[in-house]
Image (cartoon, helix red, strand yellow):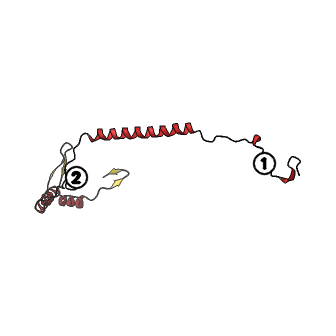
Amino acid sequence: MRKDNPGNEPNVPKPENMRYESGDLALPVILKWMAGFFAFSLLSGGVTFAIYVVMLGGQKEEASSLGPGKRLPPAPVLQNTVTAKQDIADLRARERQVLDGFGWADKDLRTVRIPVSRAIELTAQRGLANRVEGVVR
């Protein structure tokens, strides 16, 4: 048993020996931070609104039956059945002409295009190119 603590009292420090902060919160500092936060919020909101107004550029909204502020999207450009069939027929004719006709593949390089059937015949006669040590024969 200790002599400075008679009667088995818990060892509680005396108030004059306590070491703690007497004021945890400084109200002026908190108020300054809150004022700064609200000022920043208002300023950033104002800047955002100003950018929105500038970017909008004076666009006027058209009246719509959908209600205020709502506009219909632009109508799609659709192809009707008659023109679609004609376009497909034209495409197939151009493809057939390229596959079955002679023509220039690249006139500057003097490369020609031959019909596919003729290319198959020539390949069957000559055989496929063989590679021997990187050289094509």
Residue type highlighted by circle 1? Val
Q: Position of residue 31 (x, y in %)?
A: 52, 39
Tell me the residue that label 1 is attached to.
12
Q: Position of residue 137 (x, y in %)?
A: 30, 52
Q: Nearer the viewer's eye, disc 2 or disc 1?
A: 1
Q: Position of residue 75 (x, y in %)?
A: 18, 55
Could you tell me how many numbered marks the image carries?
2
- The residue located at (47%, 40%) in the rendering is 37
Instruction: Identify the mark nearer the N-term, 2 or 1.
Output: 1
In the figure, is residue 101 to the left or right of 61? left
Query: In this view of the protein, which residue sits in the foreground, 104 or 135?
Result: 104
Check disc 2: other Cα within 10 Å, few if <14, some if 14-19, many if 20+: few
Q: Secondary structure at mark 1?
A: loop
Above or below 89: residue 50 = above
Check disc 1: other Cα within 10 Å, few if <14, some if 14-19, many if 20+: few
Tell me the residue that label 2 is attached to.
71
